[in-house]
Amino acid sequence: MDRTDKFLRALIALAWLLASAALWWPTPAHAARIKEVAVVQGVRSNPLVGYGLVVGLDGTGDQTTSAPFTTQSITALLQQMGVTVPPGTNMQLKNVAAVMVTAQLPAFAQPGQTIDVNVSSLGNAKSLRGGTLIATPLKGADGQIYALAQGNLIVGGAGAAAGGSKVQINHLSAGRVPEGATVERSVATPLNQGDSLQLDLNSSDFNTAREVARAINERMGAGTAQALDGRVVRVRMPATPDARVTFMADIENLNVELASPAAKVVINARTGSVVMNQAVTLAACAVAHGSLSVTISSTPVISQPSPFAKNGDTVVSEKADITIAQQAGSLIQMPAGTKLADVVKALNSLGATPQDLLAILQAMKSAGALNAELEVI
């Protein structure tokens, strides 16, 4: 019995210790890797654009009378291939479409590698399904050619029309050519230039900049990183390219503690969407909400002259009825909320539509009851 009592007491003590550990054990802070909060300045993708032609369409190409540039492009293409089109020839092409080709040239891309391209109709083509993109040079912002695109299009849609009826699934005027462009020229990056690199934070925050510099200095030595402002951190780099790659691979996976973001409410006035983060708080206030609707109905009225009248015409006029309905709105007291769940519960108690909620939130901000920044997109 003595051993049993000692064993039970030990279990009880262990259970009490584990239960009370939550009170004194440090709670892990919200952390993210440096690669998720910052990017290296100059190491980015570059947009490419080009003008080309898609051939092989099944009668769904541009109408050359409405898109004369398609005919001009075909004439210039045939001349490059040694085919001369007689002047004044009216080419009625239905299997060709003028398109714009866009792509993103990734950082460190080298000549010979392939990238995906997007193809979009420029004229009035009905569909690009089944078409083939002719070799199209893709240029950067400096006007230089960085890639050459060509290949068969993949269009994620289908459609049919007959007898004035039309059925269409998805979009037929745009497609994609996977690995359809070959890189012809690379873009220099600042990774191996100078004795330091600059890390640009995705959002301006002094605490994040300080934590990024602190994490790098703890791992790579004091003085390696220096926070210049709320968005820029300068990092001293090794001399050789191989050492720089190893250095970046080490620091981009370091964890940094992120502070709570500033309270913000984002409002999309076009769709009525309202998004708020966890830092939004609500002070006690009273809100009266009611809806006002105006209905206008028009009824045609026909006025005819009396029988056997010598003069007079039949006149059609309209009779308009206007009705105004206002829904009663009682004064609702909203308690203070220090958590996002409390704020959502208080706003739901109003019973307002998303469109009405836009005006209510703006009024709360003006009254000082909403402790958050309003951003309208």
Image: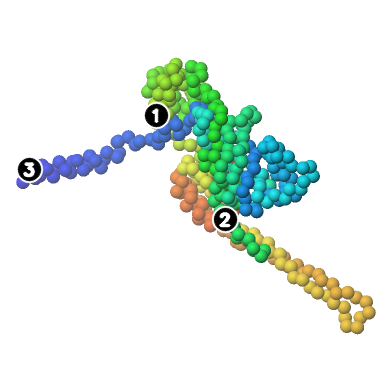
Q: Residue furthest bottom?
A: 308
Label 1 vs label 3, nearer the camera: 1
**Horizontal placement of 79 versus 280: left or right?**
right
Q: Can residue 5 be seen in this view?
A: yes
CA–CA distance in space, label 3 to label 2 = 79 Å
Q: Residue type at mark 3?
A: Arg
Seen in the picture, residue 344 relative to 138 is either above or below; the reply is below
| Residue 158 - label | 2
Q: Residue type at mark 1?
A: Leu
**Color encoding of the figure:** rainbow
The answer to which of marks 3 and 2 sits earlier in the sequence is: 3
CA–CA distance in space, label 2 to label 1 = 48 Å
Q: In which quarter of the image is the C terminus?
A: top right
Q: Residue at x 6, y 43 (%)?
A: 2
Q: Name the residue under label 1.
A: 254
Which element is circle 3 on?
Answer: helix
Residue 177 picture location, percent across and down: 55, 43
Dot 2: within a 10 Å radius of its alpha carbon, few (fewer than 14), some, or many (20 or more) residues? Answer: few
What is the quadrant of residue 28 in the picture? top left
Label 3 vs label 2, nearer the camera: 2
Residue 286 picture location, percent across and down: 55, 51
Q: Residue at x 46, y 49 (%)?
A: 342
Dot 1: within a 10 Å radius of its alpha carbon, few (fewer than 14), some, or many (20 or more) residues? Answer: some
Residue 123 picture location, percent across and down: 68, 47
Q: Mark 3 points at which residue?
A: 3
Relative to the observer, which residue lies in front, 62 or 280? 62
Q: Which residue lies furthest to the right in this view?
A: 310
